[in-house]
Image (cartoon, rainbow, N blue to C red):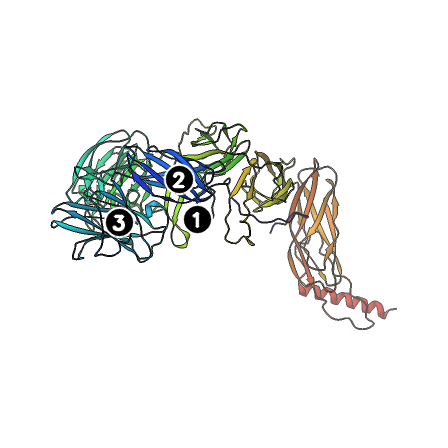
Amino acid sequence: MRAPLLGLLAVFVFASSADAISPSVTSISPVGGRRGTEVSVTITGRRLADAEEFVFYGPGVRVQRVEPVDETTCKATFAIAPDAALGLHDFRLRTRTGISGLKTFSVGSLPESNEIEPNNDFAKPQAIAMNTTINGVAGTEDIDYYAVKVKKGERISVEIEGIRLGLTLFDPAVSILDERRFELATSDDSALIWQDGFVSILAPADGTYIISAREAAYRGNGLCLYRLHVGGFPRPTATLPAGGKLGDSIDVGWIGDLLGEKSSRITLPTLPDRHFGLLASDERGTAPYPNLFRLSPFGNTLEQESNDRQPTATTFTPPTALNGVISTAGDIDHFTFTAKKDQTLDLRVFARQIRSPLDPVLTVFDKKGGRVGLNDDSGGPDSYLRFRAPRDGEYILAVADHLKKGGPDYVYRVEIAPSVPKLTLATASESLRRGGSVQAIAVPRGNRQAIVINATRTDFSGAVSVSASDLPAGASFRAGPMGPSIAQIPVLFEAGSDAPLGASLATLEGKVVDSSDVTPGSEFLSTSELVLGQNNRPFWTRTVEKLAVAVTEEAPFSIELIEPRVPIVRGGAMELKVVAKRKPGFTAPIAVSLPWNPPGISSKAEGVIPENQSEGKILINASGNAELNTWQILADATYVEPPPAGTTNRRGFRGGRLTVSSGFAKLTVVAPYLAFRYSPVSVEQGQEVVLPVKVTQSTPFEGEAKAVLVGLPNRVTAEPILITKEMTELAFKIKTDPASPPGDNKNLFCQVVIMKDGEPILHNLYGGRLRVDAPAASKKPGSVGVAAAKPATATDDKPLSRLEKLRLESKERAKAAEAAGGM
């Protein structure tokens, strides 16, 4: 246990956050629109009265108007480009004072219509036209019915967007029924589109067909909004190959559509895109959602049937991407390659990541016999294996399904290449539903805001620098080096006092410092948890590759972290001073904290700058193995919006927060100036004992240092001792009371305060031990008192045992009796 600094100020507790006074977006209605049209949307939430801008992460949706209504409502007009990508478009809402969490807006290709209640009676369904998108809601125990008229042989495709809209834990189910209520097709979950479902049939006769949409367990609610796409569009379940080389033109086969397999010539983009997909289209329509398609630097090798046995394995040469299908139950696809001894290759399977139902197992065999590599799951259902060839020769790579299943859409892609260095920068997950903070920057004019960036190094080590580009006008960026031993740092955004209000999507990039032979690829990722499942586990997430940065109105305060003039020592503690500059009229308490601690440094969750005051403190402690280094640290200060008027308690209230940051300050961690070696001692209740301590001083200091013995039991005292740099031994005189509790106290330590440049350097020096014993026997009237327990010598490393002490006391009594008899 680390001791707190003596005299530390009491603190109030405030919730911590990394965001400014941010708007909270609860819902958007409608949740999507047709490309080539303008859509009026209504946004509900909190703190929306000063809404100004929507920030979309990709092209395709332009915001024409933003019209705040009140604190809880905002209206806007979205102009959707005719060539906008179908599917989800990520965005945030910027107000004059903050920026929201990430939300999505869905773009479709069909005419839009709304559900009209009542439509929950099978006999009275809502009539709709083919090739329509319906915006509806699945209530509790609600089944929505829609009727379409089609000709015999026409394809009826139905797809529902539910969980993908990111609003709530919604498990939709869809069915196609005939007029006699006979179910022709049904779908709850689909590997292709996650928890959502789709069905396709060929109409067996002319007539009216009924489509039902509901929550699978009939537990819907007002947030279970859906987009139901009904039409004659194709809906393939997979593509082969499942990926391709950036910039290539390739032939892609469409698998799983009712009207048979087809192929298309596709020209792939030249830049990576983790959300890239291919849209199936024919003379009857276009699929409402893309089939995910992997983009990479590698060309394709397609499996050559029959390769279900090792002797007929498909030959390939790395680097490449293997593409195939586990087409039947029990199928195993084999590929063969040649490798040199100690050649290292990364083998990475893409199946579930591209929405294949395959749960792949990857195995590598030596062609001369014996398995030399195996992987099933690697942080998810897909497989990854780093293979190092044990000899020159031929090897067999095998792909199979974990449960030995198969089917025409069990596609896979295995990318095989030498390992290359890679640097991944990322924010923490944005989990607003779990009380987390917005992972975007809203920096007030004339102020600063920090965010912590995590770094994952693959196949390299060393220090990393982080840079940011594409910032809003008037904003700037600062970051210290990320040393070889650390995987995260705070980075700082600043805005000039005259910076215009606005937002942009910043590009963050990392580079290796002082290394000419390693140039890792760099990427930045930020993941938002939109829907949580059981036990608050992320169920539906969206990942973007830019950091939203906004310049907002001035804050009513700013802070500075006063740089300490002295170091913190291993095992020691320090109070960091934070000074606030308040604007006139702003008197509220401000919570202060460190958003990031250097390795081996811990900080108290939060301190406080009390109401109408300007200074606060943050207690930090250094572990005994804290890294010796000089670090750049900064502080956050958060004002929490008070509860609404008339509210008597804060329980359940989550108000807005305004967070600003200090500039960087240096914190140096050094070895302790001195070390103590304690000799354990024992003493009887009511007696005194001397605790000897040997002192080793490694860093000379001027003047006197004060040593205080801490951890003594109740009713036991010891006077402090003043130490100088010449001293090599100390002796604490310990006094006990007849009522001092007996026991072995193993957690004694000294707090030693060395003053330098007017600031304390606090050491916590552990290892002391004191045993308090009850008297061995009551004294008889007229007997001579027993001497105080003998302290162990400075060289004695073991306390006296109970037996040794009894023997010593017996000898002392005998001597006393002998002396009394001779008088």
SS label for mark 2: strand
Instruction: Give amino acid for label 2.
Output: Lys
Please tell me how many numbered marks the rendered image carries. 3
Give the distance between the C-alpha atoms of the residues marked 3 and 2, in whole angstroms: 31 Å
Closer-to-camera residue (74/686)? 74
Q: Hey, which quadrant is residue 373 in on the image?
A: top left
Q: CA distance from mark 1 to mark 3?
A: 25 Å
What residue is shown at x 71% (from left), y 37% (from top)? 758
In the picture of the structure, the residue carrying the numbered disc 1 is: 433
**Residue 257 visible in the picture:** yes
Q: Residue at label 2?
A: 75
Q: Earlier in the sequence, mark 3 or mark 2?
A: 2
| Residue highlighted by disc 3 | 197
Among numbered discs 2 and 1, the one appearing first in the sequence: 2
Q: Nearer the viewer, mark 2 or mark 1?
A: 2
Q: Nearer the viewer, residue 791 or 272?
A: 272
- Depth order, front residue of 346/644: 644
Q: Looking at the picture, which amino acid does disc 3 mark?
A: Gly
Name the element at disc 3: loop
- Give coordinates of residue 683: x percent, y percent: 72, 60
Q: Residue 232, how many percent across, how many down? A: 18, 43
